[in-house]
């Protein structure tokens, strides 16, 4: 997937202007950036929920606007930032809706649909919730149900807008591990918006940092996550150290000047990355 000269706007408010983007195939791409910088807007355009004002999103070289809708639903799964469940729908029914793009007019529901739904619920820990109405669930339970629905859709491309919102720390890690497994097992391409920079650094193969509708930096987290970038993108002073678990970059917010005051004698992995 790629975008060329993409301009996205809501009526007279231009959010993204002339943006070029390459989503690496079979990799996990994470988009980070401050509130209102255009992350969700971009993701919606990648999922064809928003029509570009100018430019285009390309799927295997074809303009998204020219790909049949049913084909898009078979290839691209999108989890919006604040999805709205149909009133009164149960968990099992909502997850089953993920199968719609795969159903044929002559056979509404197959064993493979059943299996995909059961599998998606199992992997997201939502099996026990099957008969519960979605609008009676906690925020975190609900979020896992939406993820189950996206999984049941079984697409090669997954677009996830803040999939860890509402989740406690253990469930956040569980969902991100699941995302990575999905990517590894079938070389699924994932594009996720995350707010936690350290989770982004851990789970991304390719990181895209946005600010005010522009891409400020992109590449592997080890090359992109620096104190300068955090300053430029979020206006936040920080120290970037080595993550004790992964060895990757770990952002620790800190007051201005902290970087300069760090003693030179510290071992390399304790020293901030310049
Ligand atoms: N439906 C809409 N109509 C008009 N303006 C919108 C609409 N949706 C978003 N915007 C505006 O577009 C800009 C970008 O919004 P977007 O939702 O893409 O930001 P975001 O980067 O996802 O932010 P957040 O981190 O808060 O989710 C904001 O200024 C927002 O107010
Ligand atoms: Mg958003």
Image: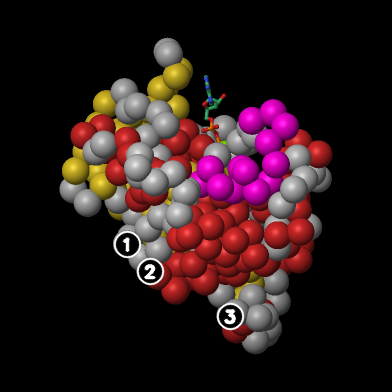
Circles 1 and 2: CB atoms closer than 8 Å: yes
Q: Residues within 10 Å of mark 1 (few under 14, many from 20)?
A: some
Q: Residues within 10 Å of mark 2 (few under 14, many from 20)?
A: some
* Mark 2 element type: loop
Question: Which sits in the foreground, 182 or 41?
Answer: 182
Along the horizontal axis of the image, is 152 left or right of 125? left
Mark closest to the chain's N terminus, 3 or 1: 1
* Mark 3 element type: loop
Whole-percent x and y of residue 223? Answer: 44, 67
Q: Nearer the viewer, mark 1 or mark 2?
A: 2
Mark closest to the chain's N terminus, 1 or 2: 1
Q: Nearer the viewer, mark 2 or mark 3?
A: 2
* Mark 1 element type: loop
Residue 18 in which image quadrant: top left
All told, the count of numbered labels is 3
Q: Give the residue at mark 2.
A: 187
Please indicate, yes or no, whether residue 190 appears anywhere in the rendered image.
no
Question: Which sits in the foreground, 244 or 64?
Answer: 64
Whole-percent x and y of residue 22? Answer: 30, 52
Circles 2 and 3: CB atoms closer than 8 Å: no
Instruction: Give the extent of the magenta segment.
Output: 86-98
Q: Is residue 185 above or below residue 159?
A: below
Q: Is residue 53 above or below residue 82?
A: above
* Membership of 110 in magenta stretch: no
Q: Residues within 10 Å of mark 3 (few under 14, many from 20)?
A: few
Q: Nearer the viewer, mark 3 or mark 1?
A: 1
Residue drawn at x 53%, y 62% is 115
Q: Residue 25: which numbered mark, if any?
A: 1
Q: Residue 247: which numbered mark, if any?
A: 3
Question: Which sits in the foreground, 77 or 74?
Answer: 74
């Amino acid at each position: 997937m790629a975008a060329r000269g993409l301009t996205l706007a809501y009526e007279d408010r231009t959010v993204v202007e002339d943006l070029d983007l390459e989503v690496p195939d079979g990799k996990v791409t994470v988009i980070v950036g401050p509130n209102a910088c255009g992350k969700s807007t971009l993701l919606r355009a990648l999922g064809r929920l928003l029509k570009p004002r100018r430019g285009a999103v390309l799927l295997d070289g074809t303009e998204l606007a020219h790909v049949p809708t049913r084909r898009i639903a078979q290839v691209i799964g999108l989890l919006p930032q604040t999805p709205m469940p149909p009133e009164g729908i149960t968990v099992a029914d909502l997850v089953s809706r993920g199968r719609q793009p795969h159903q044929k007019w002559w056979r509404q529901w197959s064993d493979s649909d059943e299996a995909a739904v059961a599998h998606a619920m199992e992997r997201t820990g939502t099996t026990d919730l099957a008969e519960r109405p979605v609008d009676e669930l906690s925020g975190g339970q609900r979020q896992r149900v939406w993820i189950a629905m996206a999984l049941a859709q079984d697409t090669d491309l997954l677009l996830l807008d803040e999939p860890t919102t509402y989740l406690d720390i253990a469930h956040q890690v569980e969902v991100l591990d699941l995302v990575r497994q999905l990517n590894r097992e079938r070389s699924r391409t994932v594009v996720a918006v995350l707010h936690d920079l350290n989770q982004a650094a851990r789970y991304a193969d390719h990181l895209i940092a946005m600010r005010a509708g522009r891409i400020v930096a992109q590449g592997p987290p080890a090359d992109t996550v620096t104190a300068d970038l955090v300053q430029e993108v979020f206006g936040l002073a920080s120290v970037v150290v080595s993550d004790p678990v992964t060895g990757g970059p770990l952002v620790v917010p800190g007051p201005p000047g902290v970087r300069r005051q760090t003693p030179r004698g510290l071992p390399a992995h304790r020293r901030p990355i310049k």
